Amino acid sequence: MQHWIVAPIVLPALIGPLIVLTMRHDATLQRIAGIASMVALVGITLALLVAASGGDIESYELGSWPAPFGIVLVLDRLSALMVTLTALLGLIVLAYASATGWDQRGRNFHALFQFQMMGLFGAMLTGDIFNLFVFFEILLIASYGLMTHGGGRMRLRGGVQYVIFNLAGSTLFLFALGTLYAVFGSLNMADLAERALILPDGDAALVRVTAALLVLVFVLKGALLPLHFWLPNTYALAPAPVAALFAVMTKVGAYAVIRVYTLIFPDTLAAMDGLISDVLLPAALITLAVGMIGVLGGGTLARVVSFAAIGSMGTLFLAVSTFSETGIAAALYYLVHSTLAGAALFLIVDQVRARRGNSALRVQAPMSGGGLVSALFFVAAIAAAGMPPLSGFLGKLLVLDAVRDQSWWVWAWGFVLGTSLLAVVGFARAGSALFWKPHDTMTPTADDFRIAPGATSGVGLGVIGVLLALIVALAVFAAPATRYAQSTAAQLFHPVSYIHAVMGTPEQRAAREAAEAAARAAHDAAHGLGDDAPDDGAVPQTAPPSEGH
């Protein structure tokens, strides 16, 4: 199974250029290649998930260069969960884009989509924090192309804003990496975890600065307040399939926080209580409040759903900020739910736009097929608001239970329950305006969006139904899903197995060093570099004795 770890990165990296070079003038071939690639990726990632569920951690050394010198990919329960979720969502989104004609509203959609998947998979599988930065940049480049897919003045303006914020985050990331390398002399995450245990006291201040910089970078990617300004316009103006895919992109920020701060900086976190209690926790609570207030006051369905995505990140970071096993387990379950619910809502926004010409929450003429769209919206809104019996309710219960032992649990419970009420009212208001209020006969006026041919096709509605079915399945199979999340959290808080999988056990390292010493001795003897080598004025190099000579 080891060699399959690299497949989720290599496959889209090959299919993307192939589409550009050989299929750019044939829409049918592009769709076949793109969807075939995603089907294969779903199969591969499901196999990786099954392999990781046993608890074993596997590493893959690119070019057979051992860590920490070479590039290493690591498969554990967390990375397997994230790549499987990403592959499933990617297949659903690509099927929707192909069925509704979104993929043909601009150039190179399928190639950009493959590069986007490559960046997502790479960020989740890499065992090197510098390569995490590299894959973040691949994400940024591909997502900008997808964000502006189809053109339009407003979409271009939103894309520029998105790029500016993320470039600022990339700059901070480089500063943090430079400081990290100056302190540790390595950027391999397993090696950093080992070196952090023997860090001199004099370097502790630099490590805390690095940890703070990385928090800023990751919460910017995760749209945590006050670094959330890029998200509402980006999501509301992006093509619907792209916005649905972006639902998992913000989760990469939360994934990076979980990975880096449970592996590299657990002792640093213990010495940085202010970072958590004074920064991350209040930011999560305020993000949750701002997001759900935006749901209540959004003027269009697109902005309502965008603010709901912000609110879900607040709930997610609330659980993450505990940095406990129960908190991380709750965060992982809620991460899966919020990704699926957010994607479903963005695709429903597209169905509303296709039928009305806009998503404004004002009285307009009835839309064709409004009954089925309203039913899909009803289910998705219940899931996003956290109402029973769907997985959003269970996810919020897990989060509330995870913070119960914290000194600030009263604030957390008050914010989660209060904002859930705001979400219910906000979604009910949006649904009433769109589907149930008396309508007049005024003609809908299109916003800065052109309707894609086939946008109202039954296949598109069926794809949304698949997303909602996954949400229902997450609730029905909540027990095994929760057990997997708990096992993942337990694995994260016992990083020795991760370190040994990447760096090798002490016995493996000793054997490797002995083999290297023997190889050097044999090489020196073969080239006459031992004691009998001619004296050329240099200090003689004596090969160490080895067994068998």
Image (cartoon, rainbow, N blue to C red):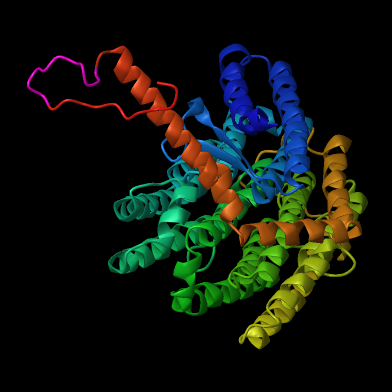
x and y percent of residue 89 in the render? 73, 43
Q: Residue at (88%, 40%) from the top-left corner? A: 462
Would you say residue 300 is visible in this rendering?
no
Which quadrant of the figure has residue 84?
Answer: top right
x and y percent of residue 108 in the render? 58, 26
464 above or below 548? Answer: below
x and y percent of residue 47 in the render? 77, 36
Q: Is residue 330 left or right of residue 113?
A: right
Q: Is residue 252 left or right of residue 130?
A: right
Magenta segment main secondary structure = loop
x and y percent of residue 383 in the render? 81, 62
- State which quarter of the image contains the C terminus: top left
Residue 237 in the magenta stretch? The answer is: no
Q: Residue at (72%, 66%) from the top-left corner? A: 330
Q: Residue at (41%, 65%) from the top-left corner? A: 212
- State which quarter of the image contains the N terminus: top right
Q: Is residue 31 left or right of residue 441?
A: left
**Front residue of 435 and 259:** 259
The number of discs equals 0
**Front residue of 54 and 421:** 54
Would you say residue 103 is visible in this rendering?
yes
Which quadrant of the figure has residue 290?
Answer: bottom right
Which quadrant of the figure has residue 14?
Answer: top right
483 above or below 273? Answer: above
Q: Start and end of the magenta stretch?
A: 529-538
Residue 531 in the magenta stretch? The answer is: yes
Outermost residue on the left side: it is 537
Q: Residue at (72%, 23%) from the top-left corner? A: 31
